[in-house]
């Protein structure tokens, strides 16, 4: 039946993985190597959006500029090392239990992230949660990234579900905008990048403060 929740589309950074601080720190470090010193708040505000676009915007250079390409590669090296070092400790407390509970409720879980697919797949594997997900989509998976609905609609199509049967869970305004544009219900989480007020203003139907609260929020409209 269309409308009965059957799948959840999770954002990754700031929703499942406690990465915003590391992303901000590594971005600042990499940009400094190329003579750019943006404000910390400006860098943190880019978390959850495509990396290459972020670096271009923060430097004022074109995405194809050699410095942006080099900075993207260096960021990938440093962030990869951070993820490998942190392992499952990269996850917010309560995330594994939350994912397991949703699966026990019969829901299909997926990841919809602004990271490229390979990076997202590596993170869920290194943090030990890859077995929970039936599908992953990255910024290079769909025709357009967040906040465009392409990624969410792609995952619904892969699962063979109507968009109304899917719930988006994310910490960023682009997650909310993507979900609403795709015709999905959205649960915002306030422990990542965006505040509860920002998520509510963007249109999130529900905003929760911990991973444990995601479960009842997702199941709220289930018959």
Image (spheres, rainbow, N blue to C red):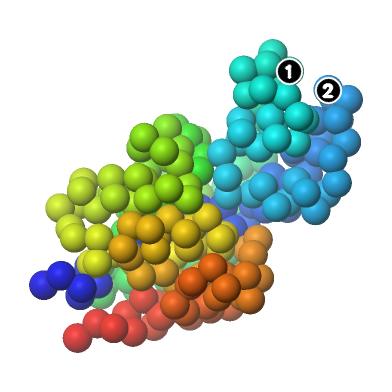
Secondary structure at badge 1 equals helix
Q: Quadrant of residue 77?
A: top right
Q: Quadrant of residue 138?
A: top left
Toward the viewer: 132 or 196?
Answer: 196
- Which mark, residue 18? none
Toward the viewer: 78 or 5?
Answer: 5
Q: Position of residue 42 (x, y in %)?
A: 78, 49
- Rounded to the nearest angstrom, the CA distance separating label 2 from label 1 is 7 Å
Q: At 24% from the left edge and 53% from the top edge, which residue is drawn?
A: 156
- Which mark, residue 67? 1
- Residue contact at pointers 2 and 1, CB within 8 angstroms: yes
Toward the viewer: 190 or 185?
Answer: 185
Q: Quadrant of residue 14?
A: bottom right
Secondary structure at badge 2 equals loop
Q: Is residue 95 above or below residue 47?
A: below
Q: Earlier in the sequence, mark 2 or mark 1?
A: 2
Q: Position of residue 64 (x, y in %)?
A: 62, 17
Toward the viewer: 4 or 61?
Answer: 61
In the figure, is residue 105 to the left or right of 20?
A: left
| Residue marked by disc 2 | 34
Crowd around label 1: few <14 · some 14–19 · many ≥20 (10 Å): some
Q: Is residue 60 above or below residue 96?
A: above
């Amino acid at each position: 039946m269309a409308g009965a929740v059957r799948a959840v589309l999770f954002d990754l950074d700031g929703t499942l993985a406690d990465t915003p601080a590391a992303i901000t720190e590594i971005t600042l470090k990499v940009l400094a190597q190329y003579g750019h010193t943006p404000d910390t708040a400006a860098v943190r505000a880019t978390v959850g959006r495509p990396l290459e676009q972020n670096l271009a915007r923060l430097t004022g250079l074109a995405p194809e500029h050699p410095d942006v390409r080099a900075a993207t590669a260096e960021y990938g090296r440093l962030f990869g090392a951070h993820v490998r070092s942190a392992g499952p400790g990269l996850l917010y407390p309560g995330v594994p239990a939350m994912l397991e509970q949703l699966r026990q409720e019969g829901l299909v879980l997926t990841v919809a992230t602004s990271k490229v697919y390979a990076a997202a797949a590596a993170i869920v594997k290194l943090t030990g949660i890859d077995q929970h997900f039936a599908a992953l989509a990255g910024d290079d998976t769909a025709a357009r990234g967040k906040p465009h609905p392409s990624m969410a609609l792609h995952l619904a199509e892969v699962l063979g579900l109507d968009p109304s049967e899917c719930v988006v869970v994310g910490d960023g305004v682009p997650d909310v905008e993507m979900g609403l544009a795709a015709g999905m219900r959205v649960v915002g989480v306030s422990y990542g990048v965006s505040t509860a007020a920002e998520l509510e203003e963007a249109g999130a139907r529900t905003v929760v403060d911990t991973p444990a609260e995601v479960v009842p929020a997702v199941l709220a409209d289930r018959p």
